[in-house]
Image: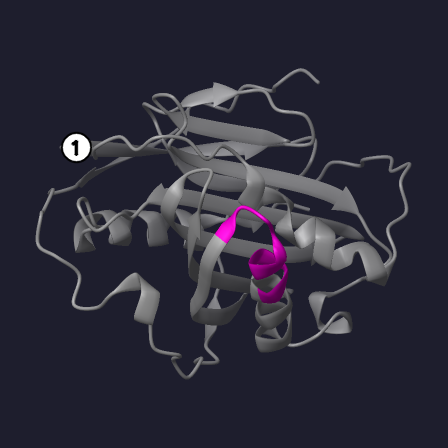
Amino acid sequence: MDWLPSKAPATVSVGIASTSAPLPFSFSHLPRLKLPHILLNGNSPTVKEEVKTSIRISRRSFAFLLLFPASIAFSPSLSAVPLLTLERYTDEVEGFTLLKPSTWAKMEKAGAKALFEEGKGANNIGVVVNPVRLSSLKEFGTPEFVAEKLIQAERRKESTKYAELITVAERLDHGGRPLYEFEYTVDSTRGGIKRIFSAALVASNKLYLLNISYTDRPESPLDSDTRTVLEQILHSFDSTV
């Protein structure tokens, strides 16, 4: 599939400071946290585009689709750059928008509507869009229910040594539809320890899935400034339909 260029974006410069300070806990003994239920107001540009769908997905296969972005590009780590500039990316055909690092290359991968990678792909952002019979995420379950299904499926993967949920939240997209956000850690034989930020949204009978994968190893832990930028990308994700 051809990739559509984004419109001339407004850029936002965000500084990222590296740190070597160790995390205050061991990844093998992460505590189980009480998951907050948060309602935020989403806000993004609106673009209407009529898209024909040819695939029907049942409720039973929804959980599998939810996991797809987490499999995108696990590879050796790269250090964070001193300055990261974010720019707006909008896919007018599929109907979604988000902020992305301007220096990350746009790649092509089967099944992904958009994939952006830093360097060789250690850190990446992927978006998957699939037609579904659901009209809302609420029909599948609560944010906590979906999060638990997500983590359970991650733990069943042969390559996964450890997976633990950190936070789960809910906000509304620009059209007032529920959008779920998740943050969790995965220790995989395919890519080491990763911090994953994911978002799921159902709009116009399409399931939108965002996955942000970032290296978070003990020798180069995710610092607070980088985390802030990744959260900004997560919260920028929205549909435009």
Q: Residue at coordinates 91% horizontally, 36% vertically from top-left?
A: 54
Colouring used for the render = one colour
Q: Residue at coordinates 16% horizontally, 41% vertically from top-left?
A: 16
Outermost bottom residue: 34
Please tell me which residue lies in front, 225 or 164.
164
Q: Residue at coordinates 34% horizontally, 26% vertically from top-left?
A: 102
Q: Is residue 99 above or below residue 169?
A: above
Q: Position of residue 13 (x, y in %)?
A: 21, 36
Q: Is residue 206 magenta?
A: no
State left or right for residue 162 relative to residue 69: left
Q: Position of residue 129 (x, y in %)?
A: 69, 41
Q: Which residues are magenta?
A: 152-160
- Label 1: few (<14), some (14–19) or many (≥20) C-alpha neighbours in 10 Å: few
Count up the numbered dots.
1
Q: Is residue 12 above or below residue 165?
A: above
Q: Is residue 174 visible?
A: no
> What amino acid does circle 1 point to?
Leu
Figure quadrant of residue 150: bottom right
Q: For the N terminus, which image quadrant?
A: top right
**Residue receiving disc 1:** 83
Q: Position of residue 212 (x, y in %)?
A: 44, 45
Is label 1 in a helix, a strand or a loop? strand
Q: Is residue 155 magenta?
A: yes
Please tell me which residue lies in front, 232 or 122.
122
